[in-house]
Image: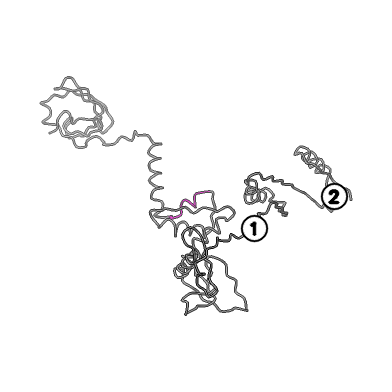
């Protein structure tokens, strides 16, 4: 038994025709006790019939209408599905962001970010460049304690420290000193921190910044004479810079751009600095320059306001 309210479009109904399932096409109500049903038979014939409440006893809904109609916004569905795909992309490609971008990082930079930085959650620091240091140096300083060792010339058992300890840098080995020690990163870091604190601690500094002059025997002078600290003179800062470099003629734009970012920008950023950049071009042409090249180069040089330019026969 089915109620008249159960007759919805696309529902399959038994009881309209003998031993035949019909599909509901449309329903039009007349009040609350009767409706006109438009249905389709299996052979495609469409017909109408009036149904009343007393007909509910012979009706049976075999298949209700679809719970979905595929009439949603396709673009929005694609956007949501793509966002969900990207959200789960790390499951099959942990470095998808690198593989889908136009940036081409070096292997050690990928290791620094994905193997060292990102596992430290919550992430509270940023791997960035010091001016002039570059990504390679910064990534190397971060990675040395995770993927390499420190190097020491020898170990002083009496002092409990390594002599000539070096970490996070290239250590060349020569035939004069073929032996050395590999030091675990955490041990090297502890010694470096200890030595840094010791170097920062200045003995004989009473409150106020005064220095007590020692007596000849090593103790304080009688009466504890006090002399002011001596400030060493600071070296004078350089006031001029000059540099000359040869560029690859096939990659002038790339090389000049790097020079501008890594050298000129730092100089031009200084207060009251006057930076002058001169480009000098010298070309030796054993077979001679064709007329059209001479004409094009000369015209372009004038357009670009060259202060001096020209071709020479000899």
State the residue in front, 259 or 65.
259
Specify start and end residues of the magenta stretch as a single range. Answer: 93-101
Number of numbered discs present?
2
**Where on the picture, by quarter, is residue 179?**
bottom right
Name the element at disc 2: loop
The mark closer to the camera, 2 or 1, is: 1
Mark nearer the N terminus (2 vs 1): 1
Q: Give the residue pinned by disc 1.
A: 235
Residue 87 at what x, y percent from top left?
Answer: 39, 48
Q: Are marks 2 and 1 in contact (CB under 8 Å)?
A: no
254 part of magenta stretch: no
* Residue extending furthest toward the right: 314
**Where on the picture, by quarter, is residue 246?**
bottom right
Name the element at disc 1: loop
In the rendered image of this protein, does residue 19 appear above or below residue 222?
A: above
Residue 106 at what x, y percent from top left?
Answer: 54, 57
Q: Is residue 120 left or right of residue 210?
A: left
* Residue extending furthest toward the top: 31
The residue sitting at 57% across, 67% down in the picture is 170
In the rendered image of this protein, does residue 205 appear above or below residue 30?
A: below
Callout 1 crowding tier (Cα within 10 Å): few <14, some 14–19, many ≥20: few
Residue 245 at what x, y percent from top left?
Answer: 72, 54
The colouring scheme, among rainbow, by chain, secondary structure or one colour, is: one colour
100 part of magenta stretch: yes
Residue 32 at what x, y percent from top left?
Answer: 15, 22
Q: Give the residue pinned by disc 2.
A: 288
The residue sitting at 54% across, 48% down in the picture is 102
The residue sitting at 40% across, 40% down in the picture is 79
Q: Is residue 285 visible?
A: yes
State the residue in front, 2 or 295.
295
Q: Is residue 147 visible?
A: no
């Amino acid at each position: 038994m089915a109620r008249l309210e159960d007759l919805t479009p696309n529902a399959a109904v038994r009881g309209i025709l003998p031993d035949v399932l019909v599909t509901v096409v449309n329903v039009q109500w007349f009040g609350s006790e009767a409706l006109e049903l438009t249905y389709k038979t299996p052979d495609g014939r469409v017909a109408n019939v009036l149904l009343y409440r007393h007909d509910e006893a012979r009706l049976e809904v075999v298949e209700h209408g679809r719970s979905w109609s595929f009439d949603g916004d396709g673009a929005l569905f694609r956007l949501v599905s793509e966002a969900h795909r990207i959200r789960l992309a790390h499951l099959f490609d942990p470095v998808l962001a690198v593989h889908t971008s136009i940036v081409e990082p070096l292997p050690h930079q990928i290791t620094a970010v994905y193997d060292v930085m990102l596992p430290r959650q919550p992430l509270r620091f940023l791997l960035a460049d010091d001016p002039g240091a570059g990504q390679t140096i910064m990534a190397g300083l971060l990675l040395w304690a995770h993927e390499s060792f420190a190097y020491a010339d020898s170990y002083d058992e009496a002092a409990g420290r390594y002599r000539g300890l070096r970490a996070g840098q290239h250590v060349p080995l020569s035939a004069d000193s073929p032996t050395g020690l590999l030091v675990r990163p955490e041990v090297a870091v502890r010694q470096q921190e200890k030595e840094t604190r010791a170097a920062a601690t200045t003995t004989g500094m009473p409150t106020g910044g005064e220095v007590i002059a020692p007596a000849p025997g090593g103790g304080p002078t009688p009466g504890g004479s006090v002399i002011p600290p001596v400030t060493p003179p600071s070296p004078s800062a350089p006031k001029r810079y000059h540099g000359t470099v040869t560029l690859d003629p096939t990659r002038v734009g790339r090389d000049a751009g790097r020079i501008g970012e890594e050298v000129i920008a730092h100089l031009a950023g200084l207060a009251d600095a006057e930076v002058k950049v001169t480009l000098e071009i010298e070309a030796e042409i054993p077979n001679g320059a064709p007329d059209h090249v001479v004409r094009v180069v000369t015209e372009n040089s004038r357009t670009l306001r060259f202060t001096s330019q020209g071709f020479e026969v000899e």
